[in-house]
Image (tube, helix red, strand yellow):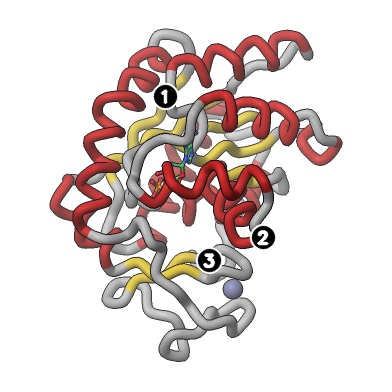
Amino acid sequence: MILIMFGAPGVGKGSQARFLSEALQIPHISTGDLFRENVANRTELGKLVKIHMDNGSLVPDEMTIGLIMDRIRQADCKQGFILDGFPRTISQVEHLEKSLKAEMRAIDTVVNITLDDAKIIDRVTGRRICPSCNSVYHLAYHKPYSVGRCNNCTTDLVQRVDDTESTVLRRLQVYYAQTEPVLSYLRDRYAVVDVVSEDDINDTTRKIYSSLDLAVHGASNKDARYMRLPSGCA
Ligand code: ADP
Ligand code: ZN
């Protein structure tokens, strides 16, 4: 299954993509995580993308498209994959379609997660991430078990440099100007499931699962494998 997680910054698409990746046993490919790893490891690519990320602009297509096209051609993507943060421009979606078509594959479903701008700003400015395993937390809504430490790997949590209020406003502007047109493009061609992001992360997961089940399997629900909720999300 080839899934695209779509939505403005801070709607929770990364967290939901991680749950789905575990449930469906297919890789979660996040352009933001890939870029941040490159920045942290001071690679050539990392040096080039940092300035764009820090000020909330998109990384230029020529640095983004090749990276993702190489990633989805790897062996672990044969059974499918989940894209998070890609495509964000019309050129990106066109390249993706072309590359999939060459392998007789296509996008199956787009999960579009929505949230009010005011809530987005609140979520993003309170967000803390694990620089080691990329888990995402929130100071008020999704606290780690032990203050400032990742539940998975106990690494100290950090705030992303682009998670300040002014940069989030810029990222939202960029989203509406450059990325939202991609959603209309996708709606004309693929099944799009719209899900409003809930305050409780597990509520959002449940909604995504039930709409995906309908979108992918119809009412008959033949393949229950896709419906197994992640542990802790009964
Ligand atoms: P969010 O969805 O919260 O904005 P991401 O981690 O997806 O966060 O992206 C962080 C930054 O990485 C973006 O602001 C942008 O600079 C860059 N980026 C991520 N994905 C793309 C993409 N597909 N095209 C261009 N730039 C991207
Ligand atoms: Zn961690």
Question: Could you tell me which secondary element the residue under label 1 belongs to?
Answer: strand
* Residue 152 in the figure: left or right of residue 79: left
Kindly identify which numbered label has been placed on residue 135.
Answer: 3
- Residue 68, position in %: x, y? 65, 32
Q: Are marks 1 and 2 in contact (CB under 8 Å)?
A: no
Labels 1 and 2: the sequence-earlier one = 2
Residue at mark 1: 192
Q: Is residue 135 above or below residue 100?
A: below
Q: Are marks 3 and 2 in contact (CB under 8 Å)?
A: no
Q: Badge 1, how many Cα within 10 Å: few under 14, some, many 20+? A: many
Question: Could you tell me which secondary element the residue under label 3 belongs to?
Answer: loop
Q: CA distance from mark 3 to mark 2?
A: 18 Å
Q: Name the front one of labels 3 and 2.
A: 2
Kindly identify which numbered label has been placed on residue 41.
Answer: 2
Q: Quadrant of residue 140?
A: bottom left
| Disc 3 CB within 8 Å of nearest ligand 2 atom | yes
Q: CA distance from mark 1 to mark 3?
A: 26 Å
Amino acid type of the residue tagged 2 in the rendering:
Asn
- Residue 59, position in %: x, y? 47, 35
Q: Is residue 227 above or below residue 92?
A: below
Amino acid type of the residue tagged 1 in the rendering:
Val
Residue 218 in view: no
